[in-house]
Amino acid sequence: MTPAPGPAGHGIPGAAPGRPPGQAPDRAARRTGVRRMPLLLAAGICLFAGLDAALILLGLPAPVTGERLPRVHGVLLVLGFAGTLVALERAVALGGRWPYAAPALLGGGGLLLLTPADPAVPRLLLAAGCAALTALYVRFWRRQPSAALLAQAAGAVCALGGALLWLGGLDVPRLLPWLVAFLVLTIAGERLELARVATLAPAAEPTFLACVATVAVGVVTTLMWPLAGTLVLGAALLTLVGWLLVHDVARRLLRSTGLPRFTAGCLLAGYGWLGLAGGLWLVTGPVTDGTRYDAVVHAVFLGFVMSMIMAHAPTILPAVLRRPLPYRPGMAVAAWLLHLSLVLRVCVGDLRDNEAAWRTGGVLNIAAVLLFVVTAAAASATAARKAAGKQPAAPRSPADTGPDRPRA
């Protein structure tokens, strides 16, 4: 996910009159980041709860157990975790106060899924959060319509449709195409923004919009004609992956070093996993359980979505929290572990019916995500301490500069 440019004047304010240059912006930035931290914390709790549920589903001991947790595992990670991140990023870009209702509702709904509350309450909050996210895109559209924005808005509509269907009682496996379309279209739209900034052929945008429209048609069709809809959706995802591989700047950045190379590698690996999921849907048709279902789910949400989150975390989190997050080699180690463990889980465990590989790969998936979180948190904390140490000291008051006190 890439950060969208905010409105004019949105961001760190300038130094206030009468204060030393450089101090007011830093303090204002820290205050802004602190105000946004609870929303990111809610997303983080949903992530950790989802990983806990993953251990339960793998048949392994977990820190927290409960009957509801495995049942809400998918929605918790897609809407509670990733949905809150997407909505928070959009709210920051739009500015103002009311846009933060979207991540607050999604994060709050995700947290309520972890409680004994009536299941209808968190489902209703998640649906309201998706509706608020859709409303954010309406505001963006009024500012500046674009094909990229249309794709992201279509993703938000798919999230809203999935949340409403879940509120109405449809089970999660039947909702899978809606949840997939939400994040795939959101990310694809943001990649189009960057492709347009670089070089884009005149026919590229119409082709992209045709892919988006076909994904949407496939998602809706899965409700009425599951086989036909799944085949259309699988073909649309494969076509979209082909478009991204041709037009994304990631191919050119793969030969660079540091963060650009890390980002490019995560993007290209993610496209490969999305292509595998599309191919499985195209070949096997609708799957609602078993190894093929596990393969599709984790190819999309771990191989594609989590890889995208890793790729853009060093760019997004500083914009959201106003804290530095420099690239560290440990992030690449976590990404490599994620993709290699997915090969073990999906290609050996799921597609070859090897239970030991499936379980081992699943544990390593969790370890990879945790390693990335720990590495990113440590890098951010270290960079923040270094930045604080370089801040100019505040000028002393006249009382501090008497004849018996040393002058600065």
Image (tube, grey):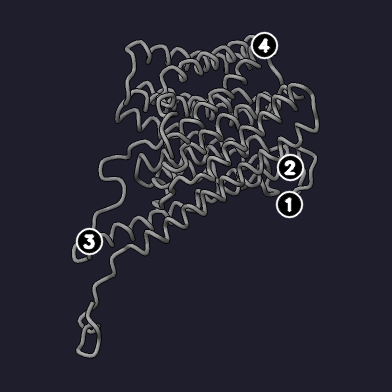
Q: Secondary structure at mark 3?
A: loop
Alpha-carbon neighbours of circle 1 within 10 Å: few (<14), some, or many (≥20)? few
- The residue sitting at 24% across, 73% down in the picture is 395
Question: Residue 131 location, x and y as percent?
Answer: 49, 33
Earlier residue among tags 1 and 3: 3
The quadrant in which residue 121 appears is: top right
- The residue sitting at 45% across, 42% down in the picture is 88
- Is there CB contact under 8 Å for labels 1 and 3? no
Query: In the rendered image, which residue does mark 1 sit on?
Result: 63
Instruction: Give the residue furthest to the bottom.
Output: 404
Query: In the rendered image, which residue does mark 2 sit on?
Result: 55
Earlier residue among tags 1 and 4: 1
Front-lying residue, 338 or 286:
338
The number of numbered discs placed on residues in the rendered structure image is 4
Q: Amino acid at mark 2?
A: Leu
Earlier residue among tags 1 and 2: 2
Q: Which mark is residue 21?
A: 3
Query: In the rendered image, which residue does mark 4 sit on?
Result: 283
